[in-house]
Amino acid sequence: MNPVRTEPDTRVSSGQTTTIPAYFRDPADAERAISELSAAGFSKKDIGVALRDESEATNKTAASKSEGLVQRFRSMFSASERDEYESSDAVDVLDHMGLSEEQGGYFRNALRTGGVLVTVNAGSRIGEALAILRRTNAITTDNIRSQQFAQASSGDTREFGAQRLQLLGETLRIHKDRVQRGEVKVRKEVVTERQNVEVPVTREEVVIERHPVQGRDAGNASFGEKEIRVPVSEEQVRVEKRPIVREEVSVGKRAVQNTKTVSDDVRHEELRVDKEGEASVNAPTRKRA
């Protein structure tokens, strides 16, 4: 194991760690992840890198390639940012990087197949760091169970010539699409109706009263024409119409929650073992993922 940069185990406290391990099958993805983490403000002192030890390589070409990868990742950190850790025990190296025993088992076996392990002490920015790692094709603890590594997390022995058969299954994934189910129009229209209103009106009439006079002296009155004009008036009704607000109507929408049941047939594959002749087969056993 070649750790280029590791974090001290003081990052783990109270049984909970803020260190995120991420395995990359492609070293170029690991380089891109380190660059994006650094650009996002994560200190390189909080970023660790581990690669497969070049002594485990099967030939000189592979060993040279492995050493070249070590130098590439080492060059991404300055001398003050590197905290290299030497150990012949791979698990000890991964523990030093702030990983739990279970995580160390997973990633130790992954590194034996090649690739690069990157750890990030994200502190309170775990979500942001995970988003960057996933975007750069990392395998993290939340998707590790869906990956097929070289062996189970807890075993050290590898079966020679072992072949793998994947049993597939279907699962229902529900999607919801918003569609228009109708439309409601709210509008105004004018309705005409006739109203009859009784309005009292007043008019004036001329009242003429004649009173008999018994031979009263006329004084200086003289004969001739004389008239009295009495103007009379009446009230006329004039109708004026003006608009008023009778009521207000507010129009809006609200979400009404209900439940719909959807169903479909799903398939899954089961293991069947057929023997021919006197072949001996151990009973299949399940290993923890």
Image: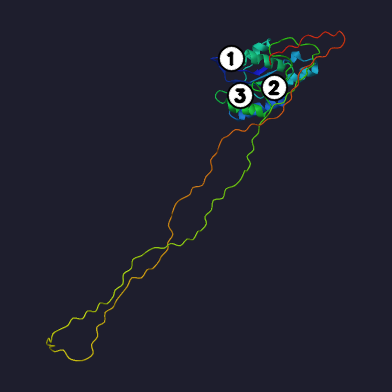
**Secondary structure at numbered mark 1:** helix
Q: Determine crowd level at label 3: few under 14, some 14-19, many 20+ residues with C-alpha closer than 10 A.
A: many
Quadrant of the frame with the C terminus: top right
Residue at 68 percent across and 20 percent down: it is 145
**Which residue in the protein does label 1 denote?**
9
Residue that extends furthest to the bottom in the rendered view of this protein: 223
Say if residue 135 shows up in the picture: yes
Q: Determine crowd level at label 2: few under 14, some 14-19, many 20+ residues with C-alpha closer than 10 A.
A: few
**Which residue in the protein does label 3 denote?**
44
**Which residue in the protein does label 2 denote?**
146
- Going from N to C along the chain, the mark reached first, 1 or 3, is 1
Q: Position of residue 214 (x, y in %)?
A: 13, 85
* Residue 155, disc: none
Q: Is residue 254 above or below residue 174?
A: below
Front-lying residue, 32 or 14: 14
Q: Position of residue 107 (x, y in %)?
A: 68, 17
Q: Distance between the Cα atoms at labels 1 and 3? A: 16 Å
Left or right side of 240 for 226: left
Residue at 62 percent across and 14 percent down: it is 100
Report if the CB atoms under discs 2 and 1 are less than 8 Å apart: no
Under mark 2, the amino acid is Ser
